Amino acid sequence: MGARTLILAVCVLLLAAVPALATLLGQLYYIDLLRRVMIFAIAAASLNLILGYGGLVSFGHAAYLGVGAYSVGILAFYGVHNGWLQWAVAIAASALVALVIGAISVRTRGIYFIMITLAFTQMLYYLGVSVEEYGGDDGMRLKVKSQFSGLVDLDDPVAFYYLVLALLLVVIYLVHRLVNSRFGMVLRAAKSNEARSRAIGFSPYPYQLVAFVISGAICGLAGALLANQTSYIAPAFMDWTRSGEIMFMVILGGMGTAPGPALGAFALLIVEDLLAGWTQHWQIILGPLLVLCVLFFRRGLAGLLPGGARHG
Amino acid sequence: MNLILVFEQMLNGLQFGVMLFLMAAGLTLVFGIMNLVNLAHGSLYMVGAYLTVAAVQWTGSYPLGVLLGLIGTLVVGMLVEVIALRTLYERDHLDQVLATFGLILFFNELIAILWGRAALYTSLPTYLQGFIEIIPGSIYPVYRALVIGVGLLVGAVLWYVVAKTRLGMLIRAGASNRIMVAALGVNIRLLYTVVFGFGAALAGLAGLMAGPIYAVQPGMGELILIQVFVVIVIGGIGSIRGAFVGSLIVGMVDTLGRAFLKPLLGAFISPPAAEAAGPALASMLIYLLMALVLAVRPEGLFPAKSG
């Protein structure tokens, strides 16, 4: 594990050095881009908890991104700019939505689960589109970013950057601790063999549901961050292609590994950014690229790291 | 609201329902037989619509254009199966979802490059533009009535093929045990390609019939695809009968909800509140229905026996 830890530590140090480097080179755009990457890395890490360790293929994680973002946006709409409160509501609201969706969908398996999580996300998408008060299809602007009693100023791009980096590390650590706890053992046992885990006395349902809710809550936090990142909230946050992207980040990075989601988010969004700078029809390249990754690159980026095979 | 309006909206619901059925039948056949989750089924719907628009313009004849559009979608479907999807049958659903998601991005962008992102509108020949009187005092567009007729006819043919013919027997046998069918000397790979092609043609038929009613634009397939998922979850995956019943239920509920929920709510709560809540609730209705069905029957209304 020595080499693996070293490489990951260098990655974190590089991320920490980005604002200084970008300022030095006069390329402030990269602070913005990498902050966006890290926010999606948080969302992908939350999905990894249930997808990679729990085997629950949620095709609707964009829903919690949207709920988190709309929580911030709607509170700000009514003049509540306190960030502590906004983010707490974002997390609680997405946990609650995850509880409702999870209670129905976790009872089902396989393809049903995929379709149901997708369908519920679509429902929330249409809800966002049809509520005219909060901008409807066009979405609404976040005029004032979340305020943290002068502790962190989100209007300062560098301060916001380090906040997101810190949160990303906390989330990765949290998920890591969670999957290695007793709770996580049961979750993984249910993934690898449900019948056996039942036989030794664990009904998977409550464990999977709790994991689903935790995952939704973390993704809600990512949504609150995303609202501040773009200063804008729209139903497009909950678009089903967004769910597909988050899912692809997890697979590309290596599901069921701690650094995988972050690596996947980094790779996908940077490739998207490069392709988009090159041609407006970048999706015609990204699509087949995705197919090829699924067909031939099954271990993910984390599998390329030394010591990665042990997690295989 | 008068009874004639209700009757017309029920016909619209039926029309939307049979369209959903054409999509759902292909999707559920492919899933039931090859165990493949094909998100790109919506792309085939879009391909059918575009090819028909192009073929009608090219030939100047509507029936000929429709025929070419159908054949074109069949060919595109078979090509996609042979090139990309064949290797996915052995993979888990997660891989299938991601790979077909990639195909959607590809197709949407390809269509946008070829025809642009703006919506296209197809013009119908004059003999399909009129109205017919179904019950006294109510006129209904000929074209929508035709869609209903074609949908029901295709449903009946599909049932006959699957239940009564040799091909249908092979299809059902392939669904329950593909290795045994292959051992008996049936070219199962070819059978799969043929089934996929037919599923694609059905999606193409739905797409080309949708063209004159809704807008033809990139991404049109995904809107209906997710509604088709709701149909399949309600009806039970892998079951044609479930797909038929699910389609009619979803088509009716969605159409009637959009038409009558707002005035209905207005009778109970204040008009401004109904104005706001009506459309929101109407667009969520089929998903709530799905949740309700799942709460009672997690396997859907008609779970397939072969699993």
Image (cartoon, helix red, strand yellow):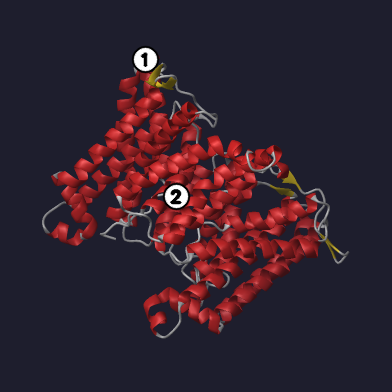
Residue at image location 63% in from the left, 64% down from the top? A96
| Chain holding disc 2 | B
Tell me the crowding category of disc 2: few under 14, some 14 to 19, or many 20 or more residues within 10 angstroms, Cα based.
many
Q: In this figure, which residue is indicated by the disc labeled 1? A: B127
Q: In what element is the residue under mark 2?
A: helix
Contact? badges 2 and 1 (CB < 8 Å): no
- Image quadrant holding the N terminus of chain B, namely top right
**Quick check: can you spot residue B52?**
yes
Q: Observer-nearest residue: A173 or B123?
A: B123
A37 sits left or right of B172 in the view: right
Number of marks: 2
Label 2 – label 1 distance at C-alpha:
35 Å
Q: Residue furthest left?
A: B184
A119 sits left or right of A233 in the view: left
Q: In this figure, which residue is indicated by the disc labeled 2? A: B230
- Image quadrant holding the C terminus of chain B, namely bottom left
User: Residue B290: percent from the left, percent from the top?
Assistant: 47, 53
Q: In what element is the residue under mark 1?
A: helix
Q: Observer-nearest residue: B260 or A262?
A: B260
Q: Observer-nearest residue: A287 or B140?
A: B140
Residue A191: mark in rendering: none
A5 sits left or right of B16 in the view: right
